[in-house]
């Protein structure tokens, strides 16, 4: 007899309520209610639940603390050890530099190796002429600080200034008189130095320039024209576009014409084609000539534009600036394509050699005729520009939402700049700090690398008692304070401070 059989129910005598109760007791317990799935990983958990790690719990629904103003937060140094090391570096660098300038860094200099070395940064940068003299340093060329190239073999003479433009020779004077400032004086025969203008040697530029009429030799002589050049440190760098003067033939004295007249110095050295050296020379020349414009636009103007753009960010004009630039890019490509297509039509109409339809109806003959290759090239370039402009539009449509998001970020940054305008000057402070550290270090290191001593030659022709016991022509060590004596000839001697030498460091730094 089961609990739910009619006999059992009859025997129990239970009412309908009892039957219901028995059914509820026999039924399985209902399953626990599941929490709804939350697909957003960044959403807040339900109230009553905490978040955080196993060790730190927090209520995400609790009221957050008020935001503190950045200027009210107590701040301190984050790396005191690095600051102390930097100060120590400055002190040691300054000590080494001052020691090198005062002549207490190295101990073995001079003719006998028993003198303290001195620092001469000018000698480190000075050109060396064909006699081994340092321009602007040694006594014989102390008033000629610049080095000027006089031959294709790299021979240099010292000059007082670099010629800014090419000088045309004065044919009423001798060839040597026109070239003497740019000659290796000891290599020029005396006959050319004393020759008058009305003589063969007085008109013989070819020998002084070391150039032959058949082109087998050129610029191999002891002299050089005064060509337009620019100052590159203490060297005179030829302007690549400087042309050699034209020297006509003189039948009276049997002197041929200079074969390279009106030819640029670059084409003479590199030939008709351009070489990597000539391109580098052009590049360096352009940098030197336009250094003021490069510095002005690359630093000053760029800094002003950056400040103006930062100010526009604070005014909420970012959208106008960004979308305006996008439209300008599209207009440039599309306009360039339209102009090239128009040019292609003009060229095609002026080309009467081969009409496109086999007749002469579309040939105007007006304008400059161009080849079929040039016409087709102009057409394809116009199609390319149209294609780039179309791709630009498609690209902007694809990233339109990203552009709007970026503009929103820039607006937030603009608000920060408006609240803290001094942040705009932080790059200027960084550059000033870099220069403050870099320039003294470069100055000190120049003296460290330029250790040596002047070696003087006594030129006193009086008796030994009046020449401090030194005979005429005797060499002796002298310091920077002694080289200005009118009776002294001096040359700079470098110290031997190479690895493995017996040079001693006499400075405690």
Image: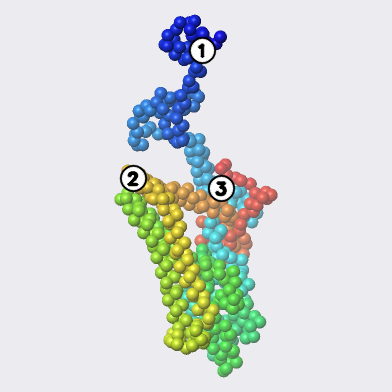
Q: Residue at x 38, y 32 (%)?
A: 74
Q: Position of residue 292 (x, y in %)?
A: 42, 64
Residue 51, placed above or below residue 458: above
Q: CA distance from mark 1 to mark 2?
A: 79 Å
Q: Earlier in the sequence, mark 3 or mark 2?
A: 3
Q: Position of residue 211 (x, y in %)?
A: 62, 82
Q: Earlier in the sequence, mark 1 or mark 3?
A: 1
Q: Position of residue 195 (x, y in %)?
A: 57, 85
Residue 409, placed above or below residue 133: above
Q: Earlier in the sequence, mark 1 or mark 2?
A: 1
Residue that label 3 marks: 104
Mark 3 lies on a secondary structure that is loop
Residue that label 2 marks: 415
Residue that label 1 marks: 4
The part of the image, by quadrant, that contains residue 189 is: bottom right
Q: CA distance from mark 3 to mark 2?
A: 57 Å
Query: In the depicted view, which residue is nearer to us: 298 or 201?
Result: 298
Mark 1 lies on a secondary structure that is loop
Residue 100, placed above or below residue 454: above
Query: In the depicted view, which residue is nearer to us: 420 or 411?
Result: 411
Looking at the image, the residue that sits furthest to the bottom is 252
Quadrant for the C terminus in the image: top right
């Amino acid at each position: 007899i089961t609990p739910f059989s009619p006999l059992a129910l009859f025997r129990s005598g239970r009412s309908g309520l009892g039957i219901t109760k028995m059914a509820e007791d026999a039924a399985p317990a209902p399953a626990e209610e599941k929490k709804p799935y939350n697909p957003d990983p960044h959403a807040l958990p339900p109230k009553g639940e905490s978040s955080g790690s196993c060790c730190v719990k927090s209520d995400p629904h609790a009221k957050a603390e008020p935001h503190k103003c950045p200027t009210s937060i107590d701040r301190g140094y984050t790396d005191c050890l690095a600051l102390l090391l930097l100060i120590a570096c400055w002190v040691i660098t300054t000590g080494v530099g001052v020691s090198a300038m005062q002549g207490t860094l190295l101990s073995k200099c001079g003719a006998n190796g028993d003198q303290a070395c001195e620092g001469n940064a000018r000698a480190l940068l000075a050109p060396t002429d064909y006699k081994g003299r340092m321009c602007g340093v040694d006594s014989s060329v102390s008033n000629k600080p610049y080095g000027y190239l006089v031959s294709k073999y790299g021979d240099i003479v010292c000059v007082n200034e670099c010629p800014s433009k090419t000088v045309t020779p004065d044919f009423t004077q001798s060839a040597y008189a026109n070239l003497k400032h740019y000659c290796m004086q000891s290599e020029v025969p005396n006959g050319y130095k004393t020759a008058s203008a009305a003589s063969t040697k007085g008109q013989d530029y070819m020998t002084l320039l070391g150039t032959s009429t058949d082109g087998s030799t050129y610029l191999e002589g002891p002299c050089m024209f005064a060509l337009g050049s620019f100052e590159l440190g203490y060297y005179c760098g030829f302007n690549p576009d400087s042309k050699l003067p034209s020297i006509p033939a003189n039948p009276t004295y049997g002197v041929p014409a200079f074969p390279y007249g009106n030819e640029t110095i670059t084409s003479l050295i590199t030939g008709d084609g351009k070489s990597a050296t000539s391109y580098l020379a052009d590049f360096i020349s352009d940098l030197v000539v336009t250094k003021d414009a490069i510095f002005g636009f690359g630093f000053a103007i760029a800094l002003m534009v950056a400040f103006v753009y930062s100010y526009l960010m604070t005014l909420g004009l970012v959208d106008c600036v960004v979308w305006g630039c996008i439209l300008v890019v599209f207009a440039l490509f599309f306009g360039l394509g339209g102009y090239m297509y128009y040019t292609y039509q003009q060229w095609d109409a002026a080309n009467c050699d081969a009409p496109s339809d086999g007749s002469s109806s579309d040939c105007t003959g007006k304008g400059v005729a161009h080849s079929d290759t040039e016409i087709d090239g102009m057409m394809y370039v116009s199609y390319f520009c149209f294609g780039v402009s179309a791709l630009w539009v498609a690209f902007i449509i694809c990233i339109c939402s990203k552009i709007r998001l970026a503009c929103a970020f820039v607006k937030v940054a603009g608000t920060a700049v408006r609240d803290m305008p001094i942040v705009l000057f932080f790059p200027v402070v960084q550059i000033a700090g870099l220069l403050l550290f870099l320039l003294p270090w470069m100055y000190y290191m120049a003296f460290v690398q330029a250790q040596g001593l002047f070696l003087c030659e006594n030129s006193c022709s009086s008796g030994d008692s009046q020449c401090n016991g030194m005979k005429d022509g005797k060499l002796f060590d002298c310091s920077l304070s002694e080289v200005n004596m009118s009776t002294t000839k001096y040359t700079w001697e470098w110290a031997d401070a190479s690895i493995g030498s017996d040079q001693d460091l006499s400075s405690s730094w």
